[in-house]
Each structure stands twice: as C-alpha cells, then as structure tokens.
Image (cartoon, rainbow, N blue to C red):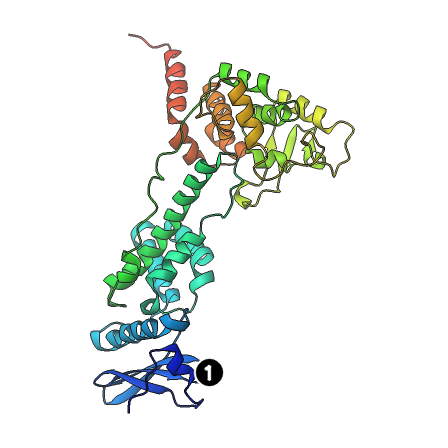
Amino acid sequence: MTTDISKVGSRKRLAAQREPYWRKLQKGRYVGYRAGADTWHARIYVNGANAFKALDLSVVGDQAWDTAKMHAEAWFAELTGGAKPHYRVDDAITDYVEHRRIGRGESSAHEAKLMLDKHVLTKFKGREVAGLTTAELKKWRDSLLPKTTDDDEDPDEAMRRAKATANKYQSYFWAALELAYQTNHVISNDAWRRIKPFGKTDKARDFYPTAEQVSTLLEHCSDAFRPLARAAVLTGFRLQALTTALVADFDAEDGTLNIHRCPDKEHQRVAALSSAAVNLFKQQAKDKLPSAYLFLRADGYPWGKSHQHRPFRDACKIGKLPREFIPYSLRHYFISRALLAGVNVHALAKNVGTSPAMITKHYGKFIRADVREMLDRVDVAA
C-alpha cells in the first residue's frame, strides 16, 4: 500500500523512522519524507544503481509536497538530461565571473564578483541552481528595496532609484543563472525567466533649479531649516552627509569637512569647502562641543530620517515653486553651477562623493556649455 505523504495530516500520522516513506512518481523515481525529522528526499535509479539526494526546501505545510516534487524532478532531469549534478549558485557565480573576465576584462569581472558575493552569496551560498524557485528569487529581488526611505529626495524618487539599483543587481544574478542554463549545467531557466525587472526606473528627475528659484526657496525656509538648505546649496553634499556631521568633523583652518558617517563607504571622504561654506559652518559650530551636531532642528534635536521633507515642501509651497523641485535638486544646482564655473570634473566628483562618469552622464549639457564657452575664447585665424 502506497503511503500518502502529499498531505500534512497524513504525514503527521506517520511513525518516526530512519528510512524515508517513499512515494513513486514514475518508474525508478521517488520522493521521500522522513517522519520525525521532517525532511524530504529524492531517489532515482540511474546507471544501474540508486542515487539519493536530500532536498533543501524553504517551505513547509501544504506547499511542501509540491515543492519537494518539483525539486526532485529538477534533479532527475539533471542526472538524465546531461546537466551537471549538484551545480550550485557558487559555481554559477565563479563561471560567470570568469566569463566576464574573458569577454570584458579584469575590471568588469571584479565588479561583478563584488556585487554577486555581497548581494547573492549571502543569501544563496551552497544552494543548487536547479532547486531555486521563482517565489524565493522574487523574494530576494524584492528584499533589495528599502522598507523606508531616508534619502535626500522625496519618497517616490528614492524608491525609483532603489528599484533601479535592484534591477542592476538582478541583471548580474540573472546573467550568471542564464549562463548556467546556456552551458547546460541546468536544464531549465523557468524559475528566473518569469521575474521581470522593475518598470519605470530609467528616467531620473532632471529638474535643475535656477538661481532665482533657489533664492526663493531659501527666503521661505524656516529659521531652523535654512542653514541646512544653505549648506546643501553651497556644497552640493547629500543632506545625509550634512545632518550627520559633527562639529569635530569640521576643520575651519583647513576649510574641510570629514564625511565619514555615511552608510555607503564610497561616499566617505574629506571634502573641501568654499569660503562661503566655511563661514556658514563656523556659525553652526559656534559655542558647540566637538561631539555636537553641526545642524540641529528647532527643538534642538538632530535631523533624523526624512525630517527635511516637510520643511522643504512647506518652503516650496509658500514660494510657489515647481513640484519637481525636491531636496536633491539643491545638489543638481551646485554641481551644474560648479561645472559652468569651470571646476574640474574629477575634482568635483571626488568632493561631492560621486564618480566622474556619473557627472558626465547626468550633467553633460553643462560640461558641453562650458567647453563651448572656452572654445569661443580660442584665438585662431579664420
């Protein structure tokens, strides 16, 4: 008599034993359940002998049987269809990194390895590619999005950028999995092929405020918020870099700010300040202890996550400024003005905490305008 292991109630009535209770799927192929241990197994007769595999399931209850059967059938297909048995995510990443090294060079391979090790292996290390499910891959992709946003931008813009980043990480992981499929290490790509990237993430907001609009904003800021907004205008720094800065981080003599409290290590740096910015920072540091924050709210507490959104929106509303004007626009404003003033792209990128490539990509029209102005000064015979 065949033991029913497909239902939770039936499994609970089984006596604990070392040998799994096997259920036949087809000739020579079985799925087994070990009562007491609550583990699942697969068995196949191939090449004149039985082969066994413990199934690593991420689900329990009513879905366990269907998931175990799917994992078992994927393994059966590997053994009989020419795919590589026990091909793991670790192997897929190693092969993909080498594939990029050959095709695109050492730098590209290094970038892929860093991203995949950080965002993929921490979750899927040791997992067999054939056992990955659409549900858990989607859950991984969705987990890349923040539950809350504390960016300088409004929540919608912050989420757009987060989705764009998630799409980038997904593209690396999917490329590694697809290479495994194309090279016949696994026989199906259904699990990841069904998950499409997040949509509407490519077009960033490209509003660049005018000097008059920035002046209007500052004029209508609250007394507590105005110094923070002015600091953003004078430096181009992300607001988080300013709200987390302590008096001890400001060096008035050298005219620098040590930005080292950002979560993203790539943004940590010692940034130079203009004379106007130094004067503003001196005013903020006056009569404060080194451990105090440079910028404080009206109630004397530090600026926390997203605290700048409401005072910024209030100032925009009073000043009748465009809806597209967001806190991050102040960074746009400074960088565009710095480029028009002839500041070197590489020096500017380092100071504001980004890459020259990003500045060229997003602020190219200002660079071109600057170059055109400089070319007009060239005295040549005509």
Q: Quadrant of the C terminus?
A: top left
Residue underneath mark 1: 37
Q: Quadrant of the N terminus?
A: bottom left
Residue reaching furthest to the front: 9
Q: Secondary structure at mark 1?
A: loop
Q: Quadrant of residue 38?
A: bottom left
**Which is nearer the eye, 293 or 137?**
137
Residue located 41% across and 72% down the image:
61
Classify 10 Å Cα crowding around label 1: few (below 14), some (14-19), many (20 and above): few
**Which is nearer the eye, 83 or 155?**
155
Q: Quadrant of residue 66?
A: bottom left
Residue 311, x across and y down, in percent:
58, 27
**Which is nearer the eye, 199 or 6?**
6
Residue 55, x across and y down, in percent:
37, 76
Q: Is residue 339 above or below residue 121?
A: above
Query: In this view of the protein, can residue 270 be seen by the observer?
Result: no
Query: In this view of the protein, can residue 139 be seen by the observer?
Result: yes
Q: Quadrant of residue 161?
A: top left
**Which is nearer the eye, 288 or 32?**
32
Callout 1 amino acid: Ala
Residue 169, x across and y down, in percent:
39, 51
**Number of marks in picture:** 1
Q: Is residue 45 above or below residue 240?
A: below
Q: Is residue 162 above or below residue 294?
A: below
**In the picture provided, is 247 more to the left or to the right than 209?**
right
Residue located 49% across and 30% down the image:
328
**In the picture provided, is 76 more to the left or to the right than 143?**
left
Residue 206, x across and y down, in percent:
40, 28
